[in-house]
Amino acid sequence: MNQTHTRKDFVVGNPLGIHARPASVFVQTAADFNAEVSVTNLDSGQVADGKSVMSMLMLAAPQGTRIRVEVTGQDASAAMDALSKLIEGGFDE
Amino acid sequence: MNGASQAPIDPLPAGTPAQTVHPVEKKEVLFHGLPASPGICRGRVLVFGAAHTDFNEIDQIPIAPSEADAEVEHFQAAVEKTKNEIKALQKKMQRTIEKRDAKIFDAHLLLVEDKLLHKEVVSRIRTQLCNAQSAFLLTIQKYINAISGANDTYLNERAGDIRDIASRVIRNLNGDPAAGPTLDNLPENTVVIAHDLTPSDTAMLDRRNILGFAIETGSRTCHTSILARSLRIPAVVGMRNIAGKFANGDEVIVDGFLGIVIRNPSKETLAFYKEKISRKDELYSLLLKESSRAAETTDGYRVKLCANIEGADDLEQVFRCGAEGIGLFRTEYLFMNTPVPPDEETQFKIYSKLLQAMHGRSVTIRTVDLGGDKLAFAASAIREPNPFLGLRAIRLCHEKPQLIRTQLRALLRAGVGGDLRIMFPMVSSLSEIEELLAIRDEVMDELKNENIPFDPKVKIGAMIEIPSACLIADALAAKVDFFSIGSNDLVQYTLAVDRLNERVAYLYRPSHPAVMELIRRTVEAAKRHRIPVCVCGEIAADPRFTPILLGLGVLELSMSPNAIAEIRGVVRKTSMLESERIAKVALTASDPEDVMDLAKEHIQTVAPDIASIFG
């Protein structure tokens, strides 16, 4: 099994931060992959399961928050590509 | 008064609104509140908003270990049911709202099926051996608390989404009727009973099937009451602790004249109301016959009676009652319940259509008065500790300059099609008017440069609703073309009484001599500068105030169209001489109630028929 682990840091760019809608888009995207996804709020230390909306909302990440996305699993790099695109694109907002 | 359109008092078909059997005996019970919108109706109760109040009333019930599996299944079934409800709602909403916004339901769906949430609820059921309701509530409460605790108003907003789905799940766990009737889709002959109806709830009401409502909050002049009057449905507000005393399907009479609600009315009560309604219908049709006659006092003073309207749908009634123009067109509704403010073209079309429909009669359009008790599309961005003293109305011209500019452009363009007047709300100082006039000039230059036709002569007016504006009325009158006194806010700001707060609503006295004095000063300043002054607040629609206002020199009144017929009736039977005498008393009275008694006496003398319908 070709386990890979990758991580990348971002700053939340969309004006409204990670609220219900961006969180759900993120979770939906993450759910397309087998890899485990975790997201850390680097400002508060809170860690979230990237496949749980509730958990993502608990991150409390308004615009400007620094977050770290960590992905572990066979399709980790593809998952990271998709998630990066999403975050950098401001969650399609 | 709106007897003409009242619902029949004949037997109700059994079983309208979601019938629920409840143990309360079928005895007649009378509840008192404040009369908010005149009229009488009889219908079946729909208790609105109960799902949200359930929250704190869930008991933790211990279960046996052997029952845990069944309880988990019960929870899973409720989640499944909730998911289906959300999907159905999503499908329905996709047609009416932007696709992007319909996505919020995706978020709701994901929240309901969230694996973290599930794990925790199931483990609570199994380890703490409690019922699914309390396991779910404890879990969700933890999330809500964590999220609302975030020290950021925006993040707080997100807790609302979770509350929303939580109440759905709990409703399904309790086995309560599925989503049930919503305010915009009511069963026939419904009387809504609720703790509160926000202005946007009221705006959403299914107009075909709502007969009336009674709520625990509010006062006669709160926005919800005003809207009820414009919808011409009887309403009673400020009723303490009634929501728990009614069940869906209860038969009820709402008397919006007396401010009472009667549950399970007796035969005698029904007969009494049947009589009352037919008398009112008769009087109303008599008054309507006079709608083409001038509103002129017995000694020859002409009074201009105009209509306040919320949207262009009310026009038929405006013509029927013989309004001489639109004295107040509120534009907030264009900005409510919408994620983005309407663009210039959209607004231009709405205003033009209105002007065209009015065939040259004057139309006064108020620029958007967001804030205060009116919900705003921007409400999520601007949450204030004290919205009535905060950023609202023209004060938004710094923070959101585009809002007022776009509206002014649309208005100036629409002005070509008729007699348009633009009114600015919440003016508190001279510099504000100067700034707005400068913006108006800039906007006109833009339009000129873009070769877009507009009317440069559109009249500009100041709404006088803050005491400071009354006290500098002379300076303001020199700058504007007309005044319009917004008495509701003027009373509230003068007396420092929140009219939405039922605990102090009794202090809200429009006949307070201080208010009378401010109106007098405003009228005097307007006279000195030869500009017209209109009163467009609630008191304009109250026949008891007609002689008082005439006596103070107000010769233009604007009110909800259904009040025009009776105000015309009062004007035609009143003399200016008598009015001036009453106004003099109003200016010096030690008790505002004395003035009301005097005014009531006057109406009883000159127009006993109209007085009688005021109960």
Image (tube, rainbow, N blue to C red):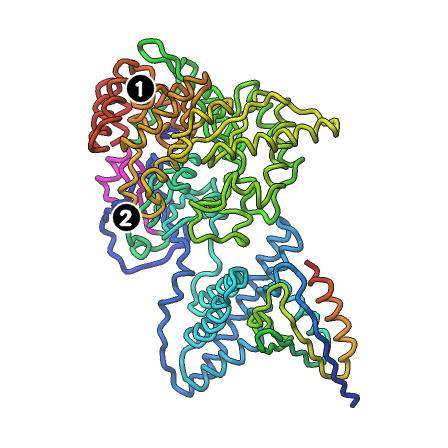
- Report the residue marked by disc 2: B263
- Left or right of B180, for residue B414: right
Does the magenta portion include B259?
Answer: yes
The chain letter under disc 2 is: B
* Residue B475 x, y percent position in the rendering: 46, 26
- Front-most of residues B156 and B514: B514
Q: Nearer the viewer, residue B28 or B159?
A: B159
Return the mark for residue B551.
1
**Residue B558 placement (x, y as % from top left):** 42, 26
Label 2 amino acid? Answer: Arg
Q: Residue furthest bottom?
A: A1
Residue B51: give x, y in percent of width and height: 42, 61
Answer with mark 1 or mark 2, whichever residue precedes in sequence. 2
Magenta span of residues: B250-275
In this picture, residue B40 sits left or right of residue B394: left
Residue B424, above or below B190: above
Q: Is residue B107 magenta?
A: no
The chain containing the residue under callout 1 comes to B
- CA neighbours of label 1 inside 10 A, class few (<14), some (14 to 19), many (20+): many
For label 2, count other residues whose C-alpha is less than 10 Å away and answer few (under 14), some (14-19) or many (20+).
many
